[in-house]
Amino acid sequence: MKRVQSELVENVSKLLRENKVGLFIGYQDGSLPLRTSPCFVTKHEDVQRLVWNSFCANNLSVYLKSVLPGLPANGRIGILCKGCDSRSLVNLIVEKQVKREDVVIIGISCPGVVNTDRLLAHLEGKKIVDVEENDEDIVVKFDGGEERFARRDYLYESCLNCAYPTPSVYDILIRVGKHSPKPVFPDPMINEFNKKSRTERWQIFEQELSRCIRCYACRNACPNCYCKECFAEQTKPRWFGLTNEHSDVFFYHVVRILHQAGRCVDCGACVRACPENINLRLFTRVLVDEVKERFGYEPGLSLNDSSLLATFSTDDKQEFMAEAD
Amino acid sequence: MARDCVVHNKDFDRFLALLIEKHSVFGPSDNDGSNGFTRIETPEQIKLHRGVAHFSFKNFFFPQTEVLFSFDLASKKIDAANKETEDGKYDILIGLRPCDALAVDLLDQVFVVPDTKDVYYAERRSKTRIISFACNEPCATCFCESVGCAPDSEVGADVIIYVLKDRYIIRTVSQAGEELINGTGMHFDAASEKDRAEKEQMMTDAKSQLTRAFSVDELDDKLANFDASYWKQICQKCIGCGICTYFCPTCHCFDITDDTEGSQGRRIRTWDSCMYPLFTLHASGHNPRPTKKERMRQRIMHKFSYSMQQYGRRLCVGCGRCVVHCPVNLDLRAVIREITEAK
């Protein structure tokens, strides 16, 4: 990890010194244990703030969907991308929200991100003083002892089944140890879900989404959600109510989820942002697998792609349009 | 007026049972639900969290969705939704931490104002008594001390309960609290010097676990500079969701909309957030807070500056919920430090 971090710092420092970018977006240590926080560096003397570790959870491509205040005049932005982040960024480029030439991508072949909440639950309020890690383990030191955790056991679910840990597009690549996950298609979680009856699936949907407080963190943490005015809040026309009653909440989520078809890269940013731990990935992952199965398409893998929903082929499967049931 | 009573552990559940028998009691439980505080049917259901509960009490007095009235244009009838409850009856909200109790007091200052009283809030508030629990074990995200609150702050509470090793000290703070305790019909021993000393020691220990997150000494001067350059750095990592405002026990902005079908409809009040771009979008299309810089500044200014000018108090109680839940770890404490340390 130390090697990766110094390689990162060196590269970013060079980019800033040579004026190849005016801003670099990476991670810094967070204010809470086992957390990092997005970090915006504009001066090469600040590059030492940058870190790389198992807790670099945010999908940083989210910051490229809107103009950043305080963006320097030369405009080019450097960004650290894990596999999933780079796919989000490629999707933003394919959907013409970002120009490829405006970004310098430092890719990192990602070994998966660790679920902080699960680690903290295990540590039960112990006062954490330090964390060390290697490719296999994380050692958390706390008042009166330390505990070793196998990284593999604490990865986010989205990471466990990640098929593209290495960025699809990058300018500089930093290799990080090995990536342990062995992706399975279709996703086992989805297999289970799909086996259930329509009523049972609806019950799960209801159960999960009834906890929603409509804070829109899932939407705002997602690089794909870049509408200037979200339909959820639009007043002209007003599509549905602003309440947290089930009908309004479900309407919001159904539309949000459906708008992810052929676009979601299953990074899990929505799940991590959700303060209610709603398994939002369950519903978008259904779409990811369905799009792959029906159209052989996975978003964010190539800059030459056309957006799935903007293309048409006479060979496209369409039997589902006439599906009975 | 304050009176300190002692209840031993074995009798505490009986005390709670008496409250439950006479009143509708709401408190933190294993099943917090989206309302934060749930109806408590038996004493065992009350589950105090370390530090604050996941949700604050806010939804209780100021629900996220509230039907103000329903109407029918055809028959020209209006049906006000707030039904008066039985006279003399009141509910109990139990298990708030002192920071949340302080937040109740702050919200009162917003909603229960003589000329512009919010009848919906005021009605519920006047029929509720607050029993808070002093905080023995603050969390790493707690910073009540930095904003003038404390683990044993009594502001906003009618009764505050101190949890000692084998007994509780029940302290009546207000006249209503005194009546509430008397109303149980239970006999209480007065707290002895020893009880009080033990309580003081626990509170001293609790306070020693809190570190000063920031100093507000120069904050007023710093915030006087509306156009300070630091805002554009401070806001950078914000992704503009509503988590900080929805979890905040003092944020109280709302929207009012009509939900209509045919000639019938409901006028509904829902929570809103200054972090949302449409919050200040004018009908003309102009938006005075077009970017997250202006929106973030508004949130900080409202909590730490405008409220000082309006009420002489800050609208932050240091509960730390915004710190815990922010998806990008944009820590309010760090924001205030950055402002106070700016040149």
Image (tube, coloured by chain):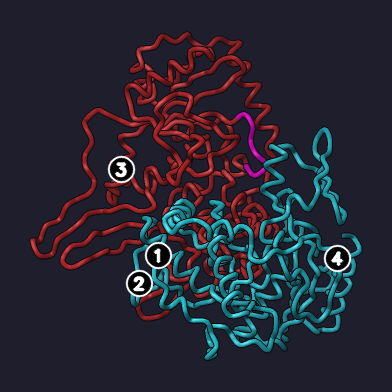
Chain colours: A cyan, B red
Rounded to the nearest angstrom, the CA distance separating label 2 from label 4 is 46 Å
Confirm whether residue A48 shows in the render: yes
The mark found on residue A176 in the picture is 4
Res A59 quadrant in image: bottom right
The mark found on residue B126 in the picture is none
Amino acid at dot 1: Phe
Does the CB distance between marks 1 and 3 fall below 8 Å?
A: no
Q: Residues within 10 Å of mark 4 (few under 14, many from 20)?
A: some
Does the CB distance between marks 3 and 2 fall below 8 Å?
A: no
Is residue B139 part of the magenta span, yes or no? Answer: yes
Q: Which residue is mark 3?
A: B122
Rounded to the nearest angstrom, the CA distance separating label 4 from label 1 is 41 Å
Image quadrant holding the C terminus of chain A, namely bottom left
Q: Which residue is mark 1?
A: A251
Residue placed farthest to the right in the image? A3
Q: Which residue is mark 2?
A: A239
Pointer 2 or 1: first along the chain: 2
The chain that hosts pointer 3 is B
In this rendering, the answer to whether B222 lies above or below B212 is: below
Rendered location of residue A137, percent (x, y): 84, 50
Of discs 3 and 2, which sits in the foreground? 2
Rounded to the nearest angstrom, the CA distance separating label 3 from label 2 is 32 Å
Of discs 2 and 4, which sits in the foreground? 4
In this rendering, the answer to whether A168 lies above or below B128 is: below
Pointer 4 or 1: first along the chain: 4
Does the CB distance between marks 2 and 1 fall below 8 Å?
A: yes
Residue drawn at (32%, 22%) of the image = B22
Task: Work out whether disc 3 and disc 2 sit on a shared chain.
Answer: no
